[in-house]
Image (cartoon, helix red, strand yellow):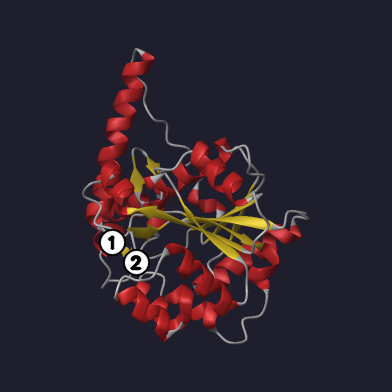
Amino acid sequence: MDAIVTAGGIPLPEEPLYSETKGHNKALLEVAGKPMVQWVLDALAAAKTIDNVIVVGLTEKAGLACKKPVHYISNQGRMLDNFRAGVRKSLDLGKKGKHVLFVSADIPAINGEMVDWVVNTAMKTDDDIYYNVIQREVMEKRFPESKRTYTRLKGMEVCGGDMNVARAKLVVAEDESGLWEKISNSRKSPLKQAALIGFDTLFLLLFRQLTLEMAAEKITKKLNITGQVIVCPYAEVGMDVDKPHQLEIIRKDFKKRLKKDEKLSGGKTKVKSKGKKPAVKRLAAKKSAKK
């Protein structure tokens, strides 16, 4: 299966991460000596289920590296257009696979095992879409201070994952109603998404009468597709970096992880940055030099 990495996000001045990016690409923020997206590429490279990697929103100038064949596509502007551009590239590569894996560039804590779990779990059936969710207790046990946005369902609270599988032909199909675009743009607001699906769904959600199974059924029926909501056991799949405190959590987590690896290896092991210095830091260094 091909993996499409969405890496075109540039925080605006009114958004929380702007203080860290200063108008540059979020995917290139430094985490443990590498651009954040490099850790995602490392995980995809380690996964047995991934063939090609397509990065949307960056170019070769980012100085990234991947052991799997990697291709770059410029930012298309809208989220859905980036998805489609990535899928078209996958189809151009002559892939016979029916499905593609979408991965956000801001979940650097994932690893190859998690990627394989998501792909293998989805491919047990032949549906159009597989959307991963993480239960609140799983997320808060792994990242207690993450402060995710949770959807309150009957019997559980979940947050969305940022690594999901979709049928390639479905993504590039024409969206005559514009519903896909609206749902994509409302991905951070479960209430807005519920209202788009239908007011009965919104009512059930507000009064916590909507089960995970009911949610999946209503969404797939509204969109005229087949699909499954998968409860993912890995908090890392939903630990995206949207705010400064989440970036700090990830940096501290990597520091602990690398320190643990160092002890296990019996000596000092430094993380070698693959490629050039992260673009955000490099540009900042140039500005400082002019002063």
Q: Identity of the amino acid at label 2?
A: Pro
Q: Is residue 209 left or right of residue 196?
A: left
Residue 65 visible somewhere in the drawing? no
Give the image location of residue 196, x and y in percent: 45, 82
* Residue placed most toward the observer, 173 or 276: 173
**In this rendering, is residue 169 above or below 63?**
below
Residue picked out by circle 1: 17
Q: Which mark is residue 11?
A: 2
Q: Identity of the amino acid at label 1?
A: Leu
Secondary structure beneath dot 1 equals loop
Give the image location of residue 2, x and y in percent: 65, 51
- Picture residue at 35% right of the left edge, 74% below the top: 205
Where, by quadrant of the figure, is residue 85 drawn?
bottom right
Mark sitting earlier along the chain (2/1): 2
- Picture residue at 37% right of the left edge, 46% below the top: 235
**In this rendering, is residue 290 above or below 186?**
above
